[in-house]
Amino acid sequence: MSWSDWQEISGDGLDFEEILYEKKWHGELEGGVARVTINKPEKYNVMTLATVDEMFRAFYDANHDTSIGVIVVAGKGKHFGVGGDVEWEKWGLREAFYNRYPHNRLIRLSRKPILAAVQGYCLGGHNHMAYCCDFTIAADNAKFGQAGPKVSSPADGFFVPYLTKVVGAKRAREMWMLCRRYPAEQALEMGLVNKVVPLDSMEEEIDGWCEELLSVSPGCLEILKASFDQEMDGYAEMGVISSQFYPDWFDMPEGKEGGASFTEKRPPRFWSLRKKEHEARQQLIDDYEGKSD
């Protein structure tokens, strides 16, 4: 079966700096595939608000192109990606993941099936983006995991508890709370990915999955995807950070410490901050009790 060459899409609001947006079509099946590639390999494909905004425009176009049946999400270079840009997040973290077009919501609301093509590091925001996709194909050099608590960057909303549907509650908490990294074969055993293939076979493997998806009714796939994604409706889109326990987390010392320690290349001092908070609180109590006497 024959594929056309990838064609880069541009013009009409589709000129991008942080992503590559391409399409190709299958000669016999007539349907096509859109590919959205985060294009910052020199920075491990980290995401900022600008990245997500460009992804929104590409996803919008792919979902309204009646010739496209599948969307592939990829990362340029050696790695799929390592989440948000920590240096940028020091002042923009909340806006990055709670803006009007968060990347996981793009996947959830897409009318077309989405396949993540993962090689190298798949960490943080890229990891939960990949497991929210309909399918994930991993190269044998892929490594998956979360990093939030290591850099005091918490996440909330539907995509955190949704991982329990993918790998089970115990594994999901392990991944999010302990920040361990999982090689491709272990990720396959956990149910985090659909298939693992040699790195040099990724393009061929992705083409095969796309051919299968293009060979069946696209309308049925849209209905099935919406039906599966309906499960997520039981989860809050926004969670505890934005509305309950820590609305000012990113302005608190501990919220700032992770990013600062990362950029300064030193271990974070989370517990020394907690100690200072305790000492300050105790001093207030002592002062109050002294005045009471």
Image: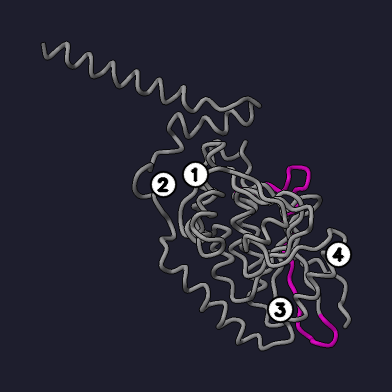
Q: Which mark is residue 241?
A: 2
Disc 2 element: helix
Q: Which residues are magenta?
A: 26-48
Are the residues at dot 4 and dot 3 in contact (C-beta closer than 8 Å)? Answer: no
| Quadrant in the picture for residue 282 | top left
User: Which residue type does callout 1 highlight?
Assistant: Pro
Question: Quick check: can you spot residue 136?
Answer: yes
The residue lying toward the viewer, choosing from 222 and 67, is 222
Count neighbours of disc 2 (C-alpha within 10 A) and say few if under 14, some if 14 to 19, many if 20 or more: some
Disc 4 element: helix
What is the CA distance from the residue labelled 3 to the residue labelled 2? 37 Å
| Pointer 3 residue | 68
User: Which residue type does callout 2 highlight?
Assistant: Ile
Mark earlier in primary sequence (1, 3): 3
| Pointer 1 residue | 154
Q: Is residue 256 above or below residue 293?
A: below
Give the number of the mark in front: 1 or 3.
Answer: 1
Q: Which mark is residue 222?
A: none
Give the number of the mark in front: 4 or 1.
Answer: 4
Give the number of the mark in front: 3 or 2.
Answer: 2
Give the number of the mark in front: 2 or 4.
Answer: 4
Whether residue 37 is in magenta: the answer is yes
